[in-house]
Structures are given as C-alpha cells and as structure tokens.
Image: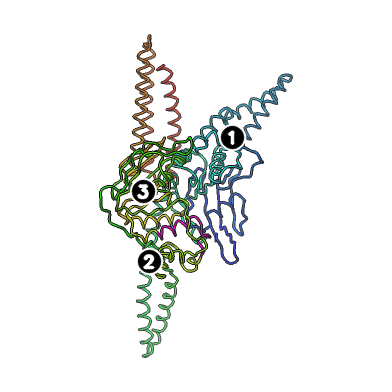
Amino acid sequence: MTDISVHELVKSFEVGKNVLDGLSFSITSGERVGILGHNGCGKTTLFRILVGELRYDEGEIAIAPSKRLGLISQIPVYPEGWTTEMVLRDAFRRLRAIGDRLDELALQMETDQSPALLREYDMLQEDFRRLGGYDMDVELSRVANGLDIPPAMLSQSFDSLSGGEKTRVNLARLILENTDILLLDEPTNHLDLHATEWLEDYLLHFKGTVLAISHDRYFLDKIVQRSIEIVDGKAEFYSGNYSFYVAERQRRFEEKLKKFEKDQAKIEQLTRAAEQMHLWAFMGNDKLHKRAFSMEKRIEKLNQTVKPTEQKKLTVKFKQRDFDGDEVLVMDGITKGFGARVLFSGIEALVTGGERIALIGDNGTGKSTLVKLIMHEEKPDAGYLYLGPTVRTAYLPQMVSFSDEHRTALDTMLYDCRCQPQEARDRLAAFGFRGEDVLTPVGALSGGEKSRLRLCMLMGGNINFLILDEPTNHLDIASREWMEDALSDYEQTLLFVSHDRYFIEKFATRIWELNDGQITDFRGGYREYCAWRERQAVFQQNDRQREKEKKKETKPNSQRPKNNDKALARLEREIARHEEMVAELDRQAEINATDYQKLMEIVSEKESLEEALLSLYERWEELSE
C-alpha cells in the first residue's frame, strides 16, 4: 500500500527558478526513507508541502486516507501557561475523549441497562484497552526518559524551554500520538548520544512510515532502507542506506564520466571524418557531402551530453608543528563544579603525541567545561592540568565568534591570519567561500559558515594539539566531508567533543566517556567501544543474576516439586528454540541489508518471535519463584 505519492511536483520562490522541478516518487507503507541533497535543494520545502504548510505550483500529492502525518521540525503553538507535561499528555486527547465517554456511560448504566448502552460501553472499553489507555502514564515516562526529558522539565512552562528542548518535547509528543507517517527534519540535532540511540531503536521497531532529513550519517545508515536524493529539483533513487548511496553515487558519476569521455573521442573522430569527406566531395564526389552531413548530425546529438561534475574536495591542509616530548596533556585529580553541583571530580588522564581522542557523554555532563579547562578558559576547583612545553594548541569552540563582526570574511582572514590576499581567497574558496561570499560580514554568517571560517583560519597556524568542540554541529553533509578531508592528513594530537558517531568512528583511536563525574577511558575506536560496553552490560546482568540466585539458595524450603522442574525444563527448551530462531533472523537481516522489502518481512517476523519469547521469560520467572 502506498502512503505517499508525489507526481511532477513544482515549487518556486523566485520567478523562473524552481526549487522543485518535476519531483516524483512514491513511499510504501512501513518504509524508512532518507531524503538527501545539498542545502537549499528543497528537502525542507518538500516536507512543509506534505504537511500543508506550503502551497505548491504544479503537480499532484496523495497521502493515504486515514493516515496521520507528523513533522518533527514544526512546533505547534500551545495555549499560554501549558507545561511540558500538558503538551505530552495532549498526545492522548483521543484516548481521554474515549475515557470521558466511558465515564458518562457508566453513570447512565446505573439507571439504564439497555443492550445498546452495554454494547457501546463494551466496544469503547475494548478500544480504550487496545489503544493503550491503561498504559498512558507508563508510555509517557518511557518516551520522556528515552529522549532525556527529566521530571523537572515536565513541570516547566513549555514557552520557557529552549529551541532544542521544544524540539525534543515535540518529538516525544508525536511518538506518543502513534503518528502513522513521521517526517523527521534533523531529528538528532538537539539529542545527545543516549537519546539518539533510543530514537534509532524506536524507529527500527516503528511499524509506520518514516521520511528522514539528516546530516547524521550514522543515523541514516542505521535507520534508512532506501534513499532519495533531490538533484536540480528532481528525484534520484538509491536502494540502500547512506553508505550505499555514497558508493553508488560515485559509481554512477564514474559511469557518466566514462560515457562523456567516450562521446568526446567519438566526436573528435567523426569531426575529422566529416571534414575529410567534405574535402573529397569538392573533388567531384557530391554523394560524400550527404555522408558528411549525416556525421555532423550525429556530432550535434553527442554534443548534448553534459560533462558530469562532482563537488570540489578540500585542498588546503593543516600546517603541523612537530611534537617533541612524551606528554601532550596531563590531568591529575581534576575537579570542577558550579555552586552545589559537581560536574566531575578526581579525573586523571595522560595524553601522548598523535592520539585522537573522542570526548563523549550525555548533555550536561561537563564535556565543554573540561575542554575549557584544558584551554585555560576555566580554572579547576582542585587538581592540576599540565600541557607539554612544545605543545601548540588550536581550538574550535562550539559557539564561534570573531574580534570584529562587521569585517568581511576576507578582511577577517587578512587581519587575523596575516596572509596575502590571494592566499586568503584560495583558502576561503577551499571552504566554500567563493566570489561575492568572501565580502559577507562575518556577523551575518550562519552558525555552520562561522565554523567553516574559523576552521579555515586555524589551518594556517603551526599546531600539534587540535581541540574541537562539536565541530560538525551546524554543518551539512558536504561541509562535514570537507572537514574530514582536512583532518585526514593531520597526524598530530586531536581531542574532540562530538555526538556525530560517523565522525567519531572515522577519527577516534581512544574514547573518553564522561558520566557520573568520571571518565571511562577506552583505547580503541567507537564500534569497539560500543561492543565492549555491551559486553560489560551483559557481565553486570550476569552478576546481578548470580546474586539473585545466591539469595534464593539461602532461603529455607526452596525445593520445588518434581512436576515444576519438568515444566521448567520444557520452558527452557522452548526458550532456547525461540532464541535460535531470533539469532537466525538477525543473520538473515545482515544478509538482506540492502533488500528493504525482505528486511521488513524479517523485522516483522522477529518482532512476533520476541513477543512470544518475552511471554516465555515471564512464565519461566513465575515457575522459578
């Protein structure tokens, strides 16, 4: 069944310049699709058209009847004085209406026991149960905890929340509403790693349809089954996630370039032959003119092939200073807090030359504060912090500012980097500032453009310790790739705070996770760290289980009757069989990772098995008691 159908959609904001120019695609129920394309290509415009916020100029749009559609970036206006909890509970308004009607019917049934009244009551009660009316509070707590909405925020006025907090609350409300079609426009922008992983897990088990715009490539890789790229207002289709899209796009580019070069060689060959035939025709053979004209028509046709282009890669590289010594950074007993709140205490760490460290953790744990301590922008409450004598640092903060916001990007480079005008223009061009862009005042640049300009300025200094605080936060995918190109040849010490798991996986050789005031120090990449963390969780669970079993053994009269033992044995065999079936489905999912239709069938079958397995576990616990 098709949930969304878009046919020959056209939308323009300027006369003669179409943002969407004949866009056509269809989305099947239950699909998870990534909407890709450079900034300004019309991705958000498409979403706003789908929810009816914008009108389109031409074309047709069809949304499956009875399907509810929700856009994450669109934050509704709520009545004055509404708290966060009231906003979240608004998702249950349909259930509350059923509950109110049930209360009315219960009062009427005290004096009226007619069959019609009883039938309506039974029907509504079943609807209330089926739609989760008895689990509203549990579901609200589950979603709020997953998206890092603490109890204190629930009592806050919704209007007093920051933009990022409002986005999280709106996302939670749409999830609680059981929306059929989710349109996600940069859903992970204001989420930390924990909340992002929770959202990914939710979407992987979500039975509805998902369209996602995101610069988080790891997120796209995990949840997307196929990709649609908007290019020149039209759709290009890729039957896989982001990594598949990147490889396939490159393959298509090389194929088009090969065809173009082949056509150019043919044009050259035909041009020489046509000239020769015209020459021979003048010597008395007029028929050769016709053959030459025929060749020239073929040349015209071949000349219509446009040479394919790909985005320019970053050409400027970091200037690096050789590091002499063993210690780049030493932290001994570092403690820092604000008022009664202690962010971290007793932190100890040693960083040596050439290490690449990712500092991760939930929002509010003190990652940016720790970076400011290293940069001597803050002082520790206790302990000491030492940088090696030959260390030369460069720092890209989360919020970038400049000495004079009225200066142009070019003047800022000339004044602050003391470089020649041509060098300044070359470096700016490598970071996407070309033509008139270099004359834009830095105060008028977007957050992403400011980050790019600051990074461009950092690349001119001799550095051996580069510190980045959320470097990809405001960057689109192309800008993130530029930054990665710049860092790929940087061989000195790197410390960066990031929630971008794709970036972390690409560069980190060491992970620092800041949690509960302490750093978990893991030497290895991000995937290795995640696998280690999962193993630790299993070990802890096994330890808790063993403790539980020890307590049971100390209880008197703990023997069970023989028939109970037999039932337990049967249950354990059944559980083992179900676990094997789930493991086999996991293997099938890996094999069919690019076949989204097959993958949907596997996921559906796995969910049914897991529900049955959960029931078996519950029965096993009852018998074990």
Nearer-N-terminus badge (1/2): 1
Q: Residue at x 62, y 55 (%)?
A: 55
Give the quarter of the figure containing the C terminus: top left
Question: Mark 1 against mark 2, which lies toward the viewer?
Answer: 1
Residue toward you, 513 or 314: 513
Task: State the mark number for residue 155.
Answer: 1
Kind of residue sitting beneath label 1:
Ser
Q: Is 163 rendered above or below residue 274?
A: above
* Residue 85 appears left or right of 548: right
| Circle 3 residue | 495
| Residue furthest to the bottom | 283
x, y (%) of residue 90? Answer: 62, 37
Disc 1 secondary structure class: loop
Instruction: Magenta stretch: give its range.
Output: 440-457
Residue toward you, 119 or 325: 325
Residue toward you, 199 or 533: 533
Task: State the mark number for residue 259.
Answer: 2
Q: Residue at x 49, y 57 (%)?
A: 39
Residue 311 visible (yes or no):
no
* Residue 499 appears left or right of 170: left
**Res 173 → quadrant:** top right
Q: Main secondary structure of the magenta part?
A: helix
* Residue 133 appears left or right of 551: right
| Residue furthest to the left | 325
Nearer-N-terminus badge (3/2): 2
Q: What's the distance in space between the residues labelled 3 and 1, CA to CA? A: 37 Å
Q: What's the distance in space between the residues labelled 3 and 2, CA to CA? A: 44 Å
